[in-house]
Image (cartoon, rainbow, N blue to C red):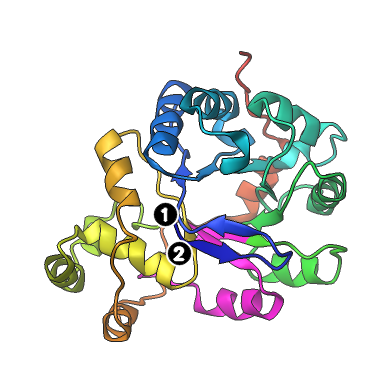
């Protein structure tokens, strides 16, 4: 495994198993099998409604808890709940998480960030982060945080390598954890000639080339899948390195094109929406 160093002295594996849009039943299996294959990072969220399943998957894998970098996110409707952190720990069946985010810049997000800082001070979160806090939201948070985040989770891929955001993150040594790393299933991205060319050069798949690009950009990447073979393939990216020339060719794909757009109306809806959590 390879790791990135965090601004608080910790470290995080460069690749993890993501669980967005994966049902509880499938998430439990995916997490269990991924950890048994050698993954060391699991990413979930309260809004994914599979935290309990991820906790069961970790336990079923037999991998010691201290060997798993566990990441989750508080949803906006929980930002003013003083027990939100304890409740997410209970759902995961753990005493701490390795990384705790606030999921969206919606509702009273500053109260949510204060929950993160409190959890960090109490050892219930060993790192903290912000998810989807791009642009003006990150600019405002910079003036208000007491503890700088270790991570930003945001959309990133070769069509949208987050050039402007990275400049700000580098200023504070904040790591980027990328979602939609393969372009949200966009066949045109995976089908780019450069990825087919490099796949042949390194005896890999185009998807593996894209994931390796992420890690060499300094990102932590969390592709999700319920297909065991895909999970195995996604991990099999650490036995080769793209050259500077390869990376320069991939950089030419930057189109400033993203797959997820969020409106102010959506943020308002996020603040009132309450996920129906698993009960067992």
Q: Nearer the viewer, residue 107 or 151?
A: 151
Q: Is residue 267 above or below residue 86?
A: below
State the residue position of label 2.
156
Instruction: Judge left or right: residue 99 versus residue 19.
Output: right
- Position of residue 57 measured from the top left corner of the image (x, y, whole percent): 50, 26
Looking at the rendering, the stretch of residues picked out in magenta corresponds to 152-178
Q: Disc 1, disc 2: CB below 8 Å?
A: yes
Instruction: Judge left or right: residue 157 versus residue 249.
Output: right
User: First in sequence: mark 1 or mark 2?
Assistant: 2
- Position of residue 108 measured from the top left corner of the image (x, y, whole percent): 82, 48
State the residue position of label 1.
180
Q: CA distance from mark 1 to mark 2?
A: 7 Å
Query: Which element carries disc 2, helix, strand or loop?
Result: loop
Query: Which element carries disc 1, helix, strand or loop?
Result: loop
Instruction: Judge left or right: residue 266 versus residue 272.
Output: left
Q: Is residue 26 above or below residue 251?
A: above
Mark 2 Cα within 10 Å, few/some/many (few <14, many 20+)? Answer: many
**Corner quadrant of residue 64:** top right
Mark 1 Cα within 10 Å, few/some/many (few <14, many 20+)? Answer: many
Q: Is residue 252 above or below residue 131?
A: below
- Rendered residue at 36%/70% (across/down): 159
Q: Nearer the viewer, residue 15 or 104?
A: 15
């Amino acid at each position: 495994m390879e790791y990135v160093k965090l601004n608080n002295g910790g470290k995080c594996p460069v690749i993890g198993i993501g669980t967005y849009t994966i049902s509880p039943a499938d998430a439990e299996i995916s997490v269990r099998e991924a950890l048994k294959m050698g993954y060391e990072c699991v990413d979930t969220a309260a809004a994914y409604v599979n935290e309990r399943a991820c906790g069961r998957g970790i336990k079923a894998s037999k991998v010691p808890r201290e060997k798993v970098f566990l990441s989750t996110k508080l949803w906006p409707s929980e930002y003013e709940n003083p027990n939100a952190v304890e409740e997410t720990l209970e759902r995961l069946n753990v005493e701490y998480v390795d990384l705790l985010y606030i999921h969206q810049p919606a509702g009273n997000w500053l109260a949510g960030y204060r929950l993160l800082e409190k959890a960090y001070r109490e050892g219930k979160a060993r790192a903290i982060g912000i998810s989807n806090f791009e642009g003006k939201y990150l600019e405002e948070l910079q003036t208000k945080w007491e503890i700088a985040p270790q991570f930003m989770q945001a959309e990133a891929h070769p069509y949208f390598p987050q050039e402007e955001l990275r400049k700000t993150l580098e200023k504070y040594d904040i790591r980027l954890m990328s979602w939609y790393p393969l372009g949200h299933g966009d066949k045109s991205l995976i089908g780019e000639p450069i990825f087919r060319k490099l796949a042949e050069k390194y005896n890999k798949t185009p998807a593996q080339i894209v994931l390796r690009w992420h890690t060499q950009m300094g990102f932590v990447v969390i592709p999700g899948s319920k297909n065991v073979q895909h999970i195995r393939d996604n991990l099999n990216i650490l036995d080769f390195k793209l050259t500077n020339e390869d990376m320069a060719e991939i950089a030419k794909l930057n189109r400033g094109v993203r797959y997820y757009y969020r409106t102010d109306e959506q943020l308002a809806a996020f603040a009132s929406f309450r996920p129906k959590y698993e009960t067992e």
